Amino acid sequence: MLYVIIDDRCTFTGITQTTSTINVAERIVEAIARAEGVTIEVLKFFDLQTHLGYGKRPGEFEYDRLSFDQGLYDPSWQPAECPSEIRQLFANQIG
């Protein structure tokens, strides 16, 4: 998993096909917050889903904001527009 934090926005993406980020999003968010020394509420989390963890072709991706309205262990994903800066930073993963 790779991630980047820009201002209060944290974007993460999987880098292997062994598991999708959707299946472990809660653990990813917890690990990032712990590594950065912040609480989860401080950041807005975005999941960049590429061909590396999903059945997509290189160049195809989804970018979703995670919402924790129902609690950390019941997230929801809302489609969001992927900033060009994120596309550039994760160009190798997007394909």
Image (cartoon, rainbow, N blue to C red):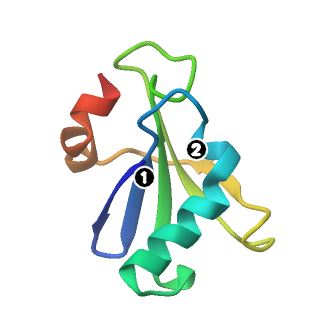
Locate residue 78 relative to residue 11 in the image: left or right: right
The answer to whether one can see residue 43 in this image is no
Return the residue found at the far front: 18
Question: Could you tell me residue 12's position as x and y percent?
Answer: 42, 52
Q: Secondary structure at mark 2?
A: helix
Q: Which mark is residue 26?
A: none
- Amino acid type, label 2: Thr
Residue at the spot 57% in from the left edge and 30% down from the top edge: 18
Residue type at mark 1 is Phe
Q: Position of residue 6 (x, y in %)?
A: 27, 67
Residue occupied by mark 1: 12
Q: Looking at the picture, how far across and down is residue 27, in whole percent?
A: 62, 62
Determine which quarter of the picture holds residue 10: bottom left
The relative height of residue 82 versus residue 92 in the rendered view (above or below) is below
- Name the spot of residue 36 as percent of width and height, x first: 37, 79
Q: Say above or below: 52 vs 57.
A: below
- Identify the mark at residue 21; answer none if there is no mark: 2
Q: Secondary structure at mark 1?
A: strand
Contact, CB < 8 Å: mark 1 with mark 2? yes
